[in-house]
Image: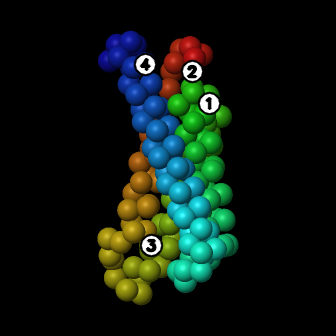
Amino acid sequence: MEQGQSGRFGAVVALTAGWLGVVVGVAGLIVAVATAGMRVAGRNIELDYTAAGIVGGLGAVYLTGGVLLVRRRIAGRRVLVVMTGLMSGATLLVVALNAAGHGVRFGPLFWWLLLNLVILALSVIEPTRRWTTTR
């Protein structure tokens, strides 16, 4: 593969990982705000303020990493690699323990694991130095 095509591939992959991080981050913040808002309004839902805070914090980290990566900052790539690596490991553990007791099911945790693995794989692919220096 020619260097020009390789650089374009790395840039597209990095932008895709960045935008997926932004989408996951915004979704996390929306869920956190909606959860807290419904609890304040008196609705009895499963999630409480602690869960809203955790989801909101995770969303903020994903959003930060995604925005930094879209803005061509290597720090964003590092944030997404660490975050998705940790979340993939934790989710894989929960999915494996759940599968041992209840059998394998393709529920929300499985899709969350898959999404994190996709973002991790796309974040690990190194964008070219030229792409990161030409902001």
Q: Secondary structure at mark 1?
A: helix
Looking at marks 3 and 2 on the same chain, the residue that comes earlier in the sequence is marked by 3
The quarter of the picture where residue 105 lies is bottom left
Q: Which mark identifies residue 74?
A: 1
Provide residue 110's location: percent of width, then percent of height.
39, 66
Q: Point out residue 28 in the picture as x, y percentages from the top left corner.
A: 54, 57
Left or right side of 1 for 127: right
- Label 3 element class: helix
C-alpha gap between disc 4 and disc 1: 15 Å
Q: CA distance from mark 3 to mark 2?
A: 36 Å
Position above or below: 17 against 88:
above
Q: Which residue occupies 57% across, 21% down?
A: 132
Quarter of the picture holding the N terminus = top left
- Amino acid type for the residue under numbered disc 2: Thr
Q: Is residue 121 above or below residue 49?
A: above
Q: In the rendering, which numbered label is found on residue 7? A: 4
Residues at marks 1 and 2, CA–CA distance in whole angstroms: 7 Å
Q: Residues within 10 Å of mark 4 (few under 14, many from 20)?
A: some
Which residue in the structure is indicated by mark 2? 132
**In what element is the residue under mark 4?**
helix
x, y percent for residue 58: 61, 57
Crowd around label 2: few <14 · some 14–19 · many ≥20 (10 Å): some
Distance Cα–Cα, label 3 vs label 1: 31 Å
Q: Nearer the viewer, residue 100 or 130?
A: 130
Q: Amino acid under label 1?
A: Ile
Q: Is residue 90 visible?
A: no
Residue type beneath disc 3 = Val
